[in-house]
Image (tube, helix red, strand yellow):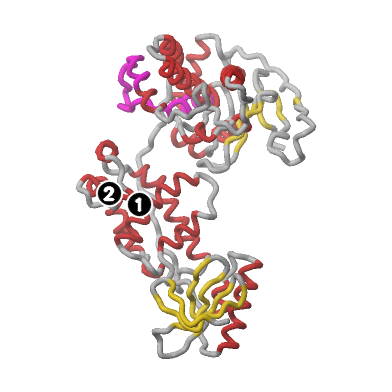
Amino acid sequence: MPQTSHRSGGAAYTNVHRLNDDLLIAQRSDQRKATWYLLKLGNKWVRRSLGTDDQKAARAKAYEAARLWHEDPDADWLAVIGSTRHHLSFKQIADEWLATQTKDFDYKADVIRKFLIPFFHQERGITNMSAVDDALIADYKVWRLNFWKRQIGGDVPANVRTKAKQSKHYGEPSPNTLNRENPTLRQILAFAARKGYFKDRSIPIVPTEAAKPNPRPAFLGDDFDKLSIRADRWVTEAATELLRQRRQLLSDWIWVARHTGIRLPHEAAKLTWGDVRLDVNLFHVANDTKTGRREVPLNDKAANRLKEMRARRSAQARKAGKELNQSEPVFVLENGTAFGGLEKLFNELIALCDFPPRADGQTYSPYCLRHTFATFALAEGMTGDHVAEVIGSSVNMLKKHYMHGTIDQTRRYLEKRGLLVSARTAQPRAHPPSLLIEPPADIPEGDWRRKQLVLTPDGQGLAIASG
């Protein structure tokens, strides 16, 4: 039975017909011409004109749009009813694109929430993607460069505002920062073009900023040994049990990151015990991280530390009458609760180590542990494509950001300490044979844990076979 009136999205509708549970059509009460509208499709209020005042024709269009939508929600069902998508707001399109993303979802969502929505939606009110042109992209860059100044002055929406202390610390974004953020905007515009949201014109260009080379800092020579020894001693110096646990977690965090190249803090925060396979020395990085899912081989140093961590956590769980939950994050306190202030604790530890100032003026951060892994791996003879696969990067990035001088310096350091055979004295040897690890019978075919592993050239670790 038709309803006499209905209000949705600020417009009043009359003669509402419920065709089925997923489909409503109606006429606008504020228009002289009795045009029918597709009011609801599925669980969404779409409010699109059906382009006719004939009820029978309107019903036919609505049913056809519903059929196409049910078959493929991403299909262009709007074309069936003669409508367009050009008037969708930037926010609607950004949200639609974000829903399709899995890799590095949290970072992309932050860029949209903090910068893109405040400018394109809240400040410029973009309700039609055809309004986004090269000039507007240039305006966005100016706005973005001055964002933190505007924030300190209170001229930023409260829902994207961060602490004043943080805004003063960051200041104007560098070209490298913009080059990390801009792919999100670039991908949203490309998505809009594929969906037909731009009207008969090419999409605007989001330029790449001219950034200076930024060689990655790493702990060189004995610096990491000094850091890890001081971290372990700091654990014993804790005045309270809670502080001891926090420092122990920091020590574990540092050690695992140095020997695996995992990104801190984001990839480490998502790592669960279900991702760790200590029977074959391997762990799995989650899908929703910067570069998506990958498998990371564990050397003995990383594997042994993870075994110690799991034993401590399991003992604590048994003490509480529980079993270790495989979905529990790896980096938690002994009672299973998360502690998110490891970066601050890391900075305190760095200050205790009293490292001499670096010649390049850079300071140590948790990310340096990842770069330390890559630097030492390259110095030890691991190929660039292998290192890139393990750390979730690219060979081009390694060439661009890792200086050969630093790698050569690390290689000489390892040779001097007897940790690396010199190329001048090395004896040729056959590559160790492949080693197939038989997985437990309960792991199904196609599961990421069914991997063929081979011994590394030094015979000391395992790597994932390319086949």
Callout 1 environment at 10 Å: few (<14), some (14 to 19), or many (20+)? some
Q: Nearer the viewer, residue 445 or 24?
A: 24
215 or 107: nearer the viewer: 107
Q: Quadrant of the C terminus?
A: top right
Q: Which x, y percent locates residue 9?
A: 42, 71
What residue appears at the point 61 percent right and 20 percent down from the top-left corner? 318
Residue 53 screen position, x and y as percent: 51, 89
On residue 115, which mark appears?
Answer: 1
Which residue appears at 58% of the width and 26% of the height? 382
Question: Along the horizontal axis of the image, is 200 left or right of 81?
Answer: left
Residue 273 makes an appearance in the image:
yes
- Answer above or below: position of 8 versus 92: below
**In the rendered image, which quarter is residue 359 located in?**
top left
Query: Label 2 neighbourhood size at 10 Å, few (<14), some (14-19), many (20+)?
Result: many
Q: Is residue 442 left or right of residue 127?
A: right
Per the rendered image, the range of residues in magenta is: 348-377
Q: Secondary structure at mark 2?
A: helix
Q: Earlier in the sequence, mark 1 or mark 2?
A: 1
Horizontally, residue 176 falls left or right of residue 253, namely: left
Q: Amino acid at mark 1?
A: Phe
- Whether residue 305 appears in this view of the structure is no
SS for callout 1: helix
In the rendered image, the residue lying farthest to the left is 153
Q: Is residue 101 above or below residue 427?
A: below
- Whether residues under marks 1 and 2 lie with C-beta atoms below 8 angstroms apart, the answer is yes
The residue lying at 42 percent from left, 55 percent from top is: 185
Q: Position of residue 438 (x, y in %)?
A: 78, 28
Where is residue 92? Give x, y as percent: 44, 62
Residue highlighted by disc 2? 147
